């Protein structure tokens, strides 16, 4: 199992290197690394990573505890997690509606991939004119 962590780390390094190389050659990388030069984007990415790690752990451990610790059926474990799933879905839809009703920082909102939701800001693209420039070195 620990070998998988090493493989994942190596894959992450290779991904970052390929994205940097593609960006330097004038290509269109999936994730322009210069975005991480913006402190807000980098901090938001770290917060999202911690958030998803926490939710992933919760979604894995609670059903396992219900099945192994409380000796309930897998169906019962799934039904126990159903309110969390429904609440997350409804909360996302409400957050999208709230974001649409608040003043937008841009005149155009990109289309939403999910009904009832909308991004707060346009997603960054690989177009160099729209990506924030990294801060100047001190």
Image: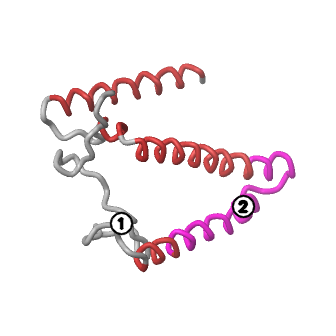
The quarter of the picture where the N terminus appears is: top right
User: Percent x, y for residue 35?
Assistant: 32, 41
User: Percent x, y for residue 32?
Assistant: 28, 39
User: Percent x, y for residue 96?
Assistant: 45, 72
Residue found at x 74% / y 63%: 80
Which numbered mark, 2 or 1, is in the foreground of this view?
Answer: 1
The residue labelled by disc 2 is 75
Label drawn at residue 131: none
Work out which residue is located at the far right of the displayed protein and give it: 70
Work out which residue is located at the far front of the displayed protein and give it: 138
Q: Which residues are magenta?
A: 64-93
Residue found at x 73% / y 52%: 63
Work out which residue is located at the far bottom of the displayed protein and give it: 101
Q: Is residue 24 left or right of residue 119?
A: left
Work out which residue is located at the far left of the displayed protein and give it: 26
The residue labelled by disc 1 is 113
Mark 2 or mark 1, earlier in chain: 2
- Marks 2 and 1 close (CB-CB < 8 Å): no
The dominant secondary structure in magenta is helix
**SS category of the residue bearing label 2:** helix
Q: Is residue 80 left or right of residue 105?
A: right
Q: Is residue 90 on the magenta stretch?
A: yes
Q: Is residue 77 on the magenta stretch?
A: yes
User: Percent x, y for residue 120?
Assistant: 39, 65
- Count of marks, rendered view: 2
Where 72 falls versus 41 (above or below)? below
Colouring used for the render:
secondary structure
The quarter of the picture where the C terminus appears is: top left
Q: How would you rate the neighbour count of disc 2 (Cα within 10 Å): few for under 14, some for 14-19, many for 20 or more?
A: few
Instruction: Tell me the CA gap for discs 2 and 1.
Output: 30 Å
């Amino acid at each position: 199992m620990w070998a998988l962590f090493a493989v994942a780390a190596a894959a992450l390094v290779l991904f970052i290197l390929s994205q940097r190389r593609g960006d330097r050659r004038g290509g269109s990388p999936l994730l322009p690394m210069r975005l991480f030069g913006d402190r807000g984007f980098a901090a938001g990415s770290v917060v999202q990573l911690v958030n998803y790690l926490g939710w992933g752990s919760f979604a894995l451990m609670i059903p396992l505890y219900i099945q192994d610790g409380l000796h309930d059926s897998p169906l019962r474990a799934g039904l126990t997690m159903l309110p969390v799933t429904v609440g997350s879905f409804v909360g996302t839809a409400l957050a999208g509606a709230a974001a649409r009703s608040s003043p937008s920082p841009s005149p155009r909102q990109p289309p939403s991939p999910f009904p009832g939701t909308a991004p707060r800001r346009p997603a960054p693209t690989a177009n160099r004119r729209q990506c924030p420039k990294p801060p100047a070195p001190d």
